[in-house]
Amino acid sequence: MTVHKKAVILFCFFVVNSAAWGVVAMTTGFGAWVLVPVLAVFLYFAVSSMSLRCPRCGKSIYLKTVRLFGTGWTYTGGFPETRCSRCGFQLNRATEPL
Ligand SMILES: [Zn+2]
């Protein structure tokens, strides 16, 4: 399995889980207890996403660099990148073990 595929699965899992808990919260009324599983999922996602790195240079695949106004801007989050923005490694093709 490629690093990108893993990241996409993790991302989908996170979205589906968040949506599911959103529905639960809406149908049962917002209670403080709803925040516990949501927070747990969020923490799990944060830890898992940190472990998903480029096999070649070790950069997190959620960390992206865009060039804007002549400067490089780095941001985290959103959909995982298919190609490492630092070294150009094909994250959706390589099957190197992590
Ligand atoms: Zn890289």
Image (cartoon, rainbow, N blue to C red):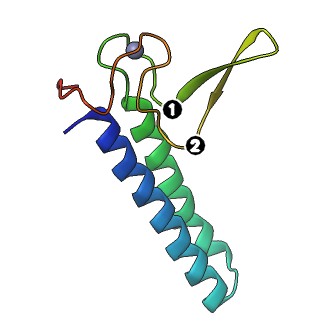
| Quadrant of the image containing the N terminus | top left
Residue under pointer 1: 62
Q: Is residue 98 left or right of residue 92?
A: left
Q: Quadrant of residue 13?
A: bottom left
Q: Is residue 69 above or below residue 4?
A: above
Circle 2 crowding by C-alpha within 10 Å: few under 14, some 14–19, many from 20: few
| Quadrant of the image containing the C terminus | top left
Tell me the residue at 35%/17% (across/down).
89
Q: Earlier in the sequence, mark 1 or mark 2?
A: 1
Tell me the residue at 46%/66% (across/down).
17
Kindly state the secondary structure of the residue where label 2 is placed. Answer: loop
Figure quadrant, ligand 1: top left
Tell me the residue at 41%/14% (across/down).
88
Residue under pointer 2: 78
Q: Is residue 4 left or right of residue 35?
A: left
Kindly state the secondary structure of the residue where label 1 is placed. Answer: loop
